[in-house]
Every structure is written in structure tokens, then in C-alpha cells.
Image (spheres, rainbow, N blue to C red):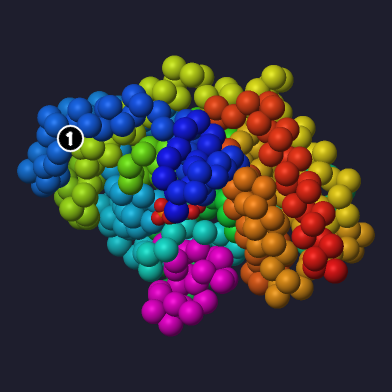
Amino acid sequence: MAVRGEGVYVWDADGNRYLDFSGSAAVNFIGHGVREISDAMAEQARQLEFVHSSQFTTPVAEEFAQELLDFAGEHFAGGAVYFTCGGSESVETALKLARQYQVEIGEKSRYQILSRQQSYHGATLGALAVSGNRKRREIYLPIVREFEHIGMPYCYRCAFDCTDSCYNCGQQYAAELERAIEAAKGATSQNNVAGFIFEPMSGATLGAVTPPPGYLQAVADICRRHGVLLIADEVMTGMGRTGRNFACEHWGTAPDILVAAKGVSSGYAPLGAVIASKKVVDAIAAGSGAFLHGFTYNAHPVSVAAGRAVLRRIRSLNLVHAADSESAGTAGSALKIALESLRDLDAVGDVRGLGLLCGVEFVADKKTKAPFAPEKNFAGLVGQACQRRGLLVYPMQGCVDGVAGDHLLIAPPAVITGEEIEWAVEQMRAAVLESAAQAR
Ligand SMILES: Cc1ncc(COP(=O)(O)O)c(C=O)c1O
């Protein structure tokens, strides 16, 4: 039972303190218990707790929308923001927005959304349909409508024999998208694909796998050539987590629709945002004039007030820079150095990631990269051993083939200090050694 949070720490009801090394689930970016956020929420609740978006907008929603557009960069100038209550709602919104965009511009045959294997886009049925996370979707498959899931580059377990940092295989994976767009035409030879959704960096499913050089640029180019909207799911990677405002910036890729949640409110309130570029907004404005979609709690004033205060905090403490692992002296670079030190452990096969979104993959045999037997639940064992030491991490299984493969996702708040990182990685080391002894 958690009862209190402050900075990078959470306390349970028995008074035990835990260092939140996974930001809960890559949610918390500004630290727990920040008074100015709860003050902004309370002030908004006192002033106006709720109005329905069919009747009103609010100053806080309008102002925060503009601030988010600015934060998303010049590619989104003249765009618009649609606020939801989280990641899954935002993904559903983005999928419907892509379909409506195509209808508005006269491409009525386009309805399919392509996506990738080993991905996660949310728990609702539309989001689950485009997800590739086998465990999380398997039993629901009979009730979802599915389109093609293409392969995804995963350099540590590259299926191609690469000697060029996976540049060439990245191009081959991108070419799968072009083939899937062509295949979706079927016998009709009509264009049927409305959008392609992807995580710029894998989140929980593969544990912070980064794309090879040139891959995302190639994917963006294919989408542009085929009139397919590019939808970046930055629910985990957005709002500074990877050391850029949005992770797509690392690869110079500008999506048509950007999906954000988690870090948008840093967990202080349920909030997600779909950031649409001008091209998408203009198509609807010039067509039917309204997006045919809505949740009761769209742009909830208290949630939006939390988001706005969080973005101010991110800016005033320069937290995007703090997360940047490519800049010396930052929390991001300290995390990278500390996690890299775990490579000497027999059970650690790979350490990867960017900024404050990292993954540590475990193997039973380092040479062959053979994973632990899934029933050993190795990541779960490490997670429990960490927790006994007062450290919270995010254990996952299935990175190899959807079932086998163990890894941890590490995503601490950006206010973490170098000493806290060192202490946390010492606990991880001890937890891995203890779990390896238990698993053998
Ligand atoms: C990339 C990505 N998209 C979507 C979601 C779904 O977000 P939520 O759990 O807020 O509905 C998640 C959740 O982990 C995610 O990581």
C-alpha cells in the first residue's frame, strides 16, 4: 500500500521507502509530491472543475494546447491538440483521426492501420488490435479486427547478418512496410491503408530498443509516398523522457500525428494528448468541420491544469536536458554509464536505450544469447529482489518471441541524482546475482 511520494521516492504504509527507478511505468518524469502541481490542480478545481467539451472549451485547455504544440516543434505549427485521459484513449483517437482525415480528403477506401510486431499501443480493443505484444493480446484476438503487423528491427537479436550497425537491415524492415501497403490493396488495387502507427523506441515490450540509423527516415518516406499518415506513439518516449522533447527528433522524423500521455501529466492526473499537424487539422476543417469522436472527460480542466503545471516544471528545471544521455554531466548520461557497468554480469546480455528510458536484457547463456526458460520468470525474480532492497523497476517477459526473453525497463524521474543512480544500480547488481543463483 503506497501512501506518500516525494522526489524519486515512494513510501508504503509500513514506512518502507522505495526508489522509483522505473518512474512507476515510465510515467513520472518530474518527481513525486511536487506541491506546485497539486496547487495548480486545486486552484483549477476551485475555479471550474468541469465543463463538457461539446459546450465549452476552457482557458487552461486552450493555453496548454498551444504550449504543447510549441513543445512538439515547428512541424506542428498551426496544428491542434485533442486531450484525453491517457495513452489508450489517445491511440484510439489517433486511429479514428487517421481514418476521418482520409475520408475528408476523398480517400474513402483507406481504413487499415498498419503497425509492428512486438509493440504496445494500449489496452482498449482498437489499441490492442494494432499492438504486437503477444501476451497482452492473445486471448482477445477473436474480438479484434486486425491488419498487418510488420517486423521490427531489434539489433541485439538481429535476424540479418549485419556488419553496419543494422543500417541495411533497417532498410529491409522499412521495405516490409511498403510491401504491406501494396498487399493491403488486395484484388481491388485501391489504396486501403489510412495510417501506420509505431513507437519510435520500443517501450515495455522489447525494453527501450532503439531503431537502427536510417530506419525511421525510410519509414516516414514510404508513408509520405503512399499517402499513409505517420502516427508516432510517444506515450512512453515523449515529453522529454529520451532527452529530446519527443523521441522522433533523434531521427529527424516528423509524424503527422503524435500521441502522448504518461509524461504529459507525470502521473499527477489522468491525461493524454493527440497532437495533430496542420495538414490533418486543415483537412477536417475544410471538410465536415468536426472530428466525429469524443469522450466525456476530454480536456478535463483539472487534468489539463496538472499537465500545464508539469510542462512549466519541465521547462523551469531544464529536465529535458537532464534526461539527455548524449550530454555529459546529466542524469541521462550517469544512468547510461551506471547501467553499462552491469554488462560484466553473466546474466546480462544487453544494456540499451536513450536518455532516461533504458532496458537491461537477461540471458541464460551470454554466448548464444539463449534466454531463460519463461517459467523461471527471471525478470520477475529480479524485480522482486530489487523491491526487497527498496528499488522499483519494471520487469517484462517476451522480448525474444512474445513468450521467452526477460528484461527490465528503467525510467526514473529526471530529478534523480548521480548518487541515487549509483545506489540503484548497486541494488540491481545484487538482485541479478541473487536471482541468477536462484534460477540455475
Ligand atoms: C507506447 C504506449 N502506448 C500506449 C500505452 C497505453 O497507455 P495507457 O496505459 O495510459 O492507456 C502505453 C502504456 O504503457 C504505451 O507504453
The amino acid marked with disc number 1 is Ala
Residue 130 is one of the magenta-drawn residues: yes
Q: Nearer the viewer, residue 403 or 285?
A: 403
- Residue 393 location (% of width, % of height): 61, 49
Q: Which residue is mark 1?
A: 45
Q: From the image, which quarter does the C terminus lie in? A: bottom right
Residue 395: quarter of image = bottom right
Q: Is residue 5 left or right of residue 59?
A: right
Residue 72: quarter of image = top left
Image point (55%, 30%), residue name:
414
Is the residue marked by circle 1 packed among few (<14), some (14-19), or many (20+) residues within 10 Å? some
Q: Is residue 318 left or right of residue 340?
A: left
Q: Secondary structure at mark 1?
A: helix
- Residue 341 location (% of width, % of height): 82, 39
- Residue 255 location (% of width, % of height): 47, 41
Residue 78 is one of the magenta-drawn residues: no
Residue 366 visible in rendering? yes
Instruction: Kindly give the residue lying farthest to the right in the view shown.
Output: 367
Which stretch appears magenta? 127-148
Q: Is mark 1 within 8 Å of ligand 1?
A: no
Residue 411 visible in rendering? no
- Residue 22 location (% of width, % of height): 58, 45
Image point (44%, 17%), residue name:
316
Image point (79%, 57%), residue name:
434
- Number of numbered discs: 1
Q: Is residue 198 left or right of residue 152?
A: left
Instruction: Kindly give the residue lying farthest to the front in the view shown.
Output: 14
Q: Is residue 117 left or right of residue 38?
A: right
Q: Main secondary structure of the magenta part?
A: helix
